[in-house]
Image (cartoon, grey):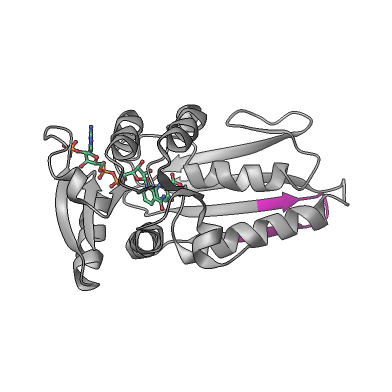
Amino acid sequence: MKIALLGYGKMGKVIERIALERGHEIVLKKDEFNTYEGLSTADVAIDFSVPTAAVDNISNCFHANVPVVSGTTGWLEHYDEMIALCNEKKGGFISSSNFSLGVNIFFGLNEYLAKIMNQFDSYKVSMEEIHHIHKLDAPSGTAISLAKGVIENSNYSEWTLDDAKNNQIHIEAKRIGEVPGTHIVNYDSAIDSIEIKHTAHNREGFALGAVIAAEWLAGKTGIYTMKDVLNLN
Ligand SMILES: NC(=O)C1=CN([C@@H]2O[C@H](COP(=O)(O)OP(=O)(O)OC[C@H]3O[C@@H](n4cnc5c(N)ncnc54)[C@H](OP(=O)(O)O)[C@@H]3O)[C@@H](O)[C@H]2O)C=CC1
Ligand SMILES: O=C(O)C1=N[C@H](C(=O)O)C[C@H](O)C1
């Protein structure tokens, strides 16, 4: 399979290694300065860039008729625009805040726990995410997805980085050293607390998940999620 890499930073380089190990060919490595030359020859594109580049990268894929897997976080305000363009161009699209198998299992656990905890007013939910100091966005896309998972299964209505009021979920975003990505969901009461935690030991899981998603999406049109790829529906 011919793959275009849109973003060739920490993630792009791990994705390249895993893609080559799985027998794929890289036909474009797009960074801030080069062009999209080669994109139209790709079977699929994988975007792990920066929040300000994601919309251009994804749009160019739809215009070039190349299905695209996007892992870039911090551009959610343009999500509906990209969905509309995908539908208009009959493109193929998977976007996920986290492509690792472990976090996708953790998302399911989070939703299940939220349903249970919604019956017990004495517990208050909060979240913590810890990432490396180079990260541009806060809170992490994964923390936002976890908050949405709670909101869809409880009486909470929004998340905040500030102190939480009423039906708000507080997210604490910490930036420490080279931490690849840690997420904690905590339910606290005066008596005890219940906590679930996912710790990434490195970037392998994110990158492998993105390559598996690209293999799955190539040749398809439509809008999908990692639940479709991993058969978690
Ligand atoms: N969904 C998931 O599973 C995961 C998502 N992420 C997300 O992926 C993104 C990338 O992470 P990471 O690799 O660590 O970040 P890096 O900063 O290491 O890499 C970002 C890359 O994007 C490049 N870039 C900048 N402008 C453009 C542009 N216009 N077109 C294409 N590329 C461009 C940068 O190029 P240059 O070097 O020239 O500046 C750099 O190579 C982040 O948003 C992060 O949150 C990260 C891990 C997992
Ligand atoms: O920037 C990162 O590194 C990561 N970003 C994603 C996010 O914002 O959730 C996924 C992962 O936690 C690593």
Residue 166 in the image, given as x and y percentages of width and height: 79, 30
Q: Is residue 174 above or below residue 202?
A: above
Quadrant of image for the N terminus: bottom left
Vertical comparison of 44 with 229: above or below: above
Query: In the figure, is residue 171 to the left or right of 89?
Result: right
Would residue 136 be seen by someone viewing this image from the given angle?
yes
Q: Which residues are magenta?
A: 186-196
Task: Determine the residue positioned at 73% across, 34% down.
Answer: 157
As drawn, is 23 to the left or to the right of 127?
left
* Residue at figure coordinates x 33%, y 60% from the top left: 207
Secondary structure of the magenta portion, mostly? strand
Report whether residue 8 is seen.
Answer: no
Instruction: Find residue 195 and report its image quarter.
Output: bottom right
Vertical order, 177 against 53 (above or below): below
Q: Does 79 appear in magenta?
A: no
Q: Position of residue 104 (x, y in %)?
A: 54, 60
Q: Please give the name of the residue rendered at 64% of the width and 42% of the height, measured from the top-left corner.
A: 148
Residue at image coords 23%, 55%: 3
x, y percentage for residue 105?
A: 57, 65
Q: Quadrant of the C terminus?
A: bottom right
63 to the left or right of 144? left
User: Which residue in the rendered view is the most extreme toward the bottom?
Assistant: 22
